[in-house]
Amino acid sequence: MDVLSAIEKRREITQFKPDPIPEHLLEQIIRSAYLAPSGNNLPSREFILVTDPQKLQALKHTTPYMQWLENVKAAVVIVSDQALSKYWLQDASIAGGFLWLTAVSLGLGAAWGVVYHSENPQESEKRERYAREQLAIPEHLRVVAIIGLGWPDKKPGSKEMYPLELVFHRELYSS
């Protein structure tokens, strides 16, 4: 599948089949995140692949909005070192996007669970602390997101989008 097809096909999937994900597919997904660009090519983001069902079950409590983690076959936790790069959040987010699109291109579904909460520092600290405790993540790393992976339980429908003209401009901003 080409990149544009993966982008067009991508949906948030929160219901998964019980089938395992072969290791070679997980390796491709991790490689895509690793190859994602980062500011000044610094290794500001790191990835934790989680396949242990007990750990996945525990991670669903990171926020009230990640109950779907109990059904995934794998998850990738993206952490970032804000002391290493001022672009730590962008670096982690780009890598997560690459990871998600690679999963789609391989026929898998994914869901993005937000851990880092830029508008609510107390909530962010609570979420990040919980994830750190579950996975022995060092204190200096920010926990950005948890991306759940699995085989989609059903084919997602098409996504309704707003008109392209609403958000795309040429040469100058026009309203």
Image (spheres, rainbow, N blue to C red):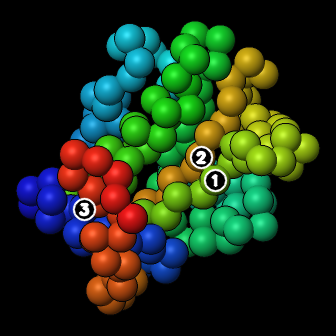
Asked whether 39 or 79 is in front, the reply is 39
* Image quarter of the C terminus: bottom left
Asked if labels 1 and 2 touch by Cβ distance under 8 angstroms, the answer is yes
Does residue 32 lie above or below 75 as drawn?
Answer: above
Give the residue type at disc 3.
Ile
Helix, strand or loop at mark 3: helix
The residue sitting at the left extreme is: 2
3D distance between C-alphas at marks 3 and 2: 20 Å
Give the residue type at disc 1.
Val
For residue 145, which numbered disc appears in the image?
Answer: 2
3D distance between C-alphas at marks 3 and 1: 20 Å
Give the image location of residue 15, x and y in percent. Answer: 49, 80
53 vs 43, left or right, is right
For the point 71% across and 68% down, the residue is 65
Q: Which residue corresponds to mark 1?
A: 114
In which quadrant of the rendered view does residue 151 lie? bottom left
For the point 40% across and 37% down, the residue is 95
Helix, strand or loop at mark 2: strand
Dot 2 or dot 1: first in sequence order is: 1
Does residue 164 lie above or below 154 as drawn?
Answer: above
